[in-house]
Amino acid sequence: MTRFHGHLTLSLAALALVPALAFAQVPAGYPASYADTIAAAKTEGKVVIYSTTDTAAANFLIKDFQALYPGISVEYNDMNSTEVYNRYIGERAAGGSADVLWSSSMDLQIKLVTDGNAIAYASPEIPGLPAWAVWKNEAFGTTYEPIAIVYNKRLLAGDEVPQSHADLMRVFTTKADKLKGKVTTYDIEKSGVGFMLITQDSQQNPAFWDFVKALGKIGPRFQSSSGTMMERISSGENLLGYNIFSSYAALRAKRDPSIGIVLPKDYTLVMSRVMFASKGAKHPNAAKLWVDYILSKRGQTLIGKEAELGSIRADVEGEMTLAGFTKALGATLKPIPVSGELLGFLDQTKRLEFLKQWQSAIKSGK
Amino acid sequence: MRAVLPRVGVISLTALAVFLPLGLIFYQSLLDAPFFMPHKVSLGAFEFIFAESDFWDALKNSLIIASSMAIIAVPLGGILAFLMVRTDLPGRHWLEPLLLIPVFVSPMVLAFGYVVAAGPVGFYSVWAKDLIGFVPWNVYSLTSIAIIAGLTHVPHVYLYSSSALKSLGSDVEEAARMAGASPLQVAKDVSLPMVTPSLLFSGVLVFFLGFEIFGLPLVLGDPEGHLVLATYLYKLTNKLGIPSYHLMAAVAVCIVAVTFPLVMLQRRLLANAGKFITVKGKAGRQRPLPLGWWRWVAAAILALWLFLTILVPLSGIALRAFVTTWGEGVRLADVLTLEHFRAVFEQPTLMRGIVNTVLIGVIGGALAVACYTAIALSTHRKPDGWTRFVDYLVLVPRAVPGLLAGLAFLWVFLFFPPLAPLRSTVFSVWIAYTVVWLAYGMRLVSSSLLQVGPELEEVARTTGASRGQITRDVTLPLIRFGLLASWLLVFMIFEREYSTAVYLLGPGTEVIGALLVSLWSTGGADLVAALSLINVVLVAIGLGVALRFGVKLHD
């Protein structure tokens, strides 16, 4: 899936001039005092978001949010996860930054939150979320995105397509001739998300280091993003991609018939984009409105159906939702909890140690 | 007295623009965390990178690539110059602009072109496989990267050696030819030795450019994990999971430690070149050397070079921009599309990138030339300490890779409050470009200034004109065509530039070059192809205008 820097200001200021329309209702189930938050947010007039989610996907949400709360414009900036982090800490040190941060790099988001950058906010939507998706009322998981194996449908078929992690090791040995040099995955030194997924694998996969050695033996091609991986898989330069967001793959598969997707049967990691409202935000009330909207059934329905990121609410139905995936895969789904545990591998010594072990396992396979 | 103030002002501003970012890099390299977070002074960053095997691999690869570039580009560039300037090679007048294309096309674009044209399942590779059963090359190997880098830097050598050759008379060569030497012998034993200083100079130039290349190894080195210093630095952005500006700054200092002495060496060589030229014959009378049947050999070499360096990557890009998918088992006729261009035009970010790129080339280019002219005038006919200082000053940014310069400017904009509002405007990119290309721009402007005879300005002075009046009414009008030509050349260079804007990229500062790097790293190949083609077209327009108005592309 393509990713680019985006910046969007959809100003509906004209609507705000009409008082009757500017009177938004307090959503059902919210405390009555929420009307004050809405009023304050309208005075602020705008919310600034730094995000890793494509503008194209986020547009559905932005338009709907502005329809719900006319008079609040959304300044949406999309960039990659390192940029979100670097830009934010740089700007915070120099003065103000965004109101809301929304990133797929779960560990970096948790780091920012533990460093005291988030507003503690008991969103009225919390009861609708799984417990693992809420951390200290500060950081919230917003999507439900299983991690998949992606393959080239033109060139791989039948028992050449692995169905699980154990099965991957099987094809690495039995189909070595065909797959040699044609398996691709994240370069975990370049991609923070890739690193996070692999460290999660190391906790889920009982035969993890054997798996890494087998991967090393097949001559893996490391890329810094899932988009690059899928481009190479689509062209046939690579045949199999490991640890790719199924959300991105599904979107690409829609217009690219070469892309096939497998959710591994033994266990499937699930990641969730983490969102928090920033301390020192210039528009704190608008930020709360945005967070609540994204977590609400209305926002989550769009996330599942239109943005194709996978809804995290159990009460939203459809294929790309927590409910839909649970029906298909059940207990093998392993969501990565939004919690302080993610900080473990941001510790520099631990991180470099893991990288070293990874590299020597990859090399020992060669 | 009135004339002194603006002069000191111009020189101080230039010094500030050059040394502030560079100083920040040095300062940052001596800290153990980003300078805006709690930090201690330490040499930890250097210790860290020196302990990494990746650093030493990158250094070794950079050395290999830089040396092979010099080994490939110097002889080829020299021979090319000889053929174009000295011989009756067929079609050499219309060939000249073609030769310079690699200088004006972004290496990102070229590298991407090589992937889609000659990568494992590239268009040409698939044809080769159909023809002979296997693909006889591998563009991802270190050897290929070195060869491609060498071939794309041939024009740099060509530029310097051809202008040196043009200033030599052809009598010596004719004598050699009459004594029975073949054209190759004439080139090898007579013409090229006479321009040794220029060859040496351009050899050093290509060698240190080799230490700064980023786009080619970023795209071609990724699949097999070949790092060079610049891509190693880029990789460090993420290695620790959190920003490691101190490590990046330390690598930057290492790169500058290599390039800075080379830039100074270049300056010495240039100074010596002037002395060396006294051996030339009486300039002026030049007759092209008849090549005889050698002309076909020469034409074949030239055609092969053009094919490999220009046709292969650019045709790859052009084709990729119009297909949805590519590779093994895909029939091109089934996958043709205009979708990618529609996607580009639908994305406000990308459209702003295109608009900004045009603005930065046209308006930014003009402003940059104005700055360069102000600096050049501040030293014009004033051979004193200030002038010598500026001579060195303008060379300094050459030694700093664009990637770094951009990062340093980001820091300046973040933490120098008066400039903060400009950070998210294209102005921040413009100032970084202007400083990075300072040496290049100054050379363009100074060479026009040198053509103004001192007597014209002296006449004005004897009639009582002030310095300001002389500049305004005599010097500037005399060099206006030279300035226009500089503007066009700077336009093309600004259209092409990519690495400098990488770290400055953000809402409001999008330019095509940096968008390409960003889109490439996240895999938006469809958009990369379409944007690359748009970029090439912009440069081609500049080149077309330049040729139409008879701008000399080099001196």
Image: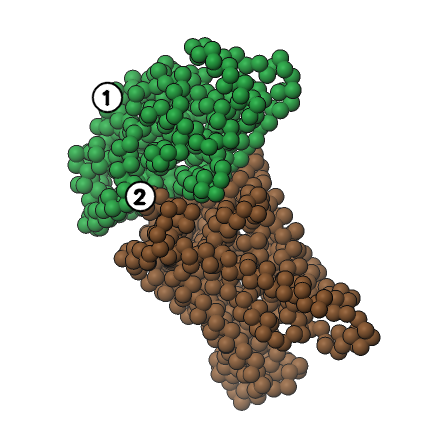
Q: Amino acid at mark 1?
A: Ala
Task: Give residue A293's position: percent from left, percent from top.
Answer: 46, 20
Residue B453 vs residue B290, the one in the foreground: B453
User: In the image, which lettered chain appears brown?
Assistant: B
Residue B172 vs residue A206, the one in the foreground: A206
Compared to residue A354, the image places residue A342 above or below, namely above
User: In the image, which lettered chain appears green?
Assistant: A
Write down the residue under mark 1: A331
Identity of the residue furthest to the right in this view: B463
- Circle 2 chain: A
Query: Which quadrant: the N terminus of chain B?
Result: bottom right
Write down the residue under mark 2: A188
Which picture quadrant has residue B51? bottom left
Indicate how the structure is coloured in the image: by chain
Please report the residue visible at 37 percent of the width from the left and 65 percent of the height from the top. Answer: B63
- On the question of residue A300 being in view, the answer is no
Task: Give residue B232's position: percent from left, percent from top.
Answer: 36, 54
Please report the residue visible at 54 percent of the width from the left and 66 percent of the height from the top. Answer: B393
Category of crowding for the residue at label 1, using alpha-carbon neighbours closer than 10 angstroms: few (below 14), some (14–19), many (at least 20): few
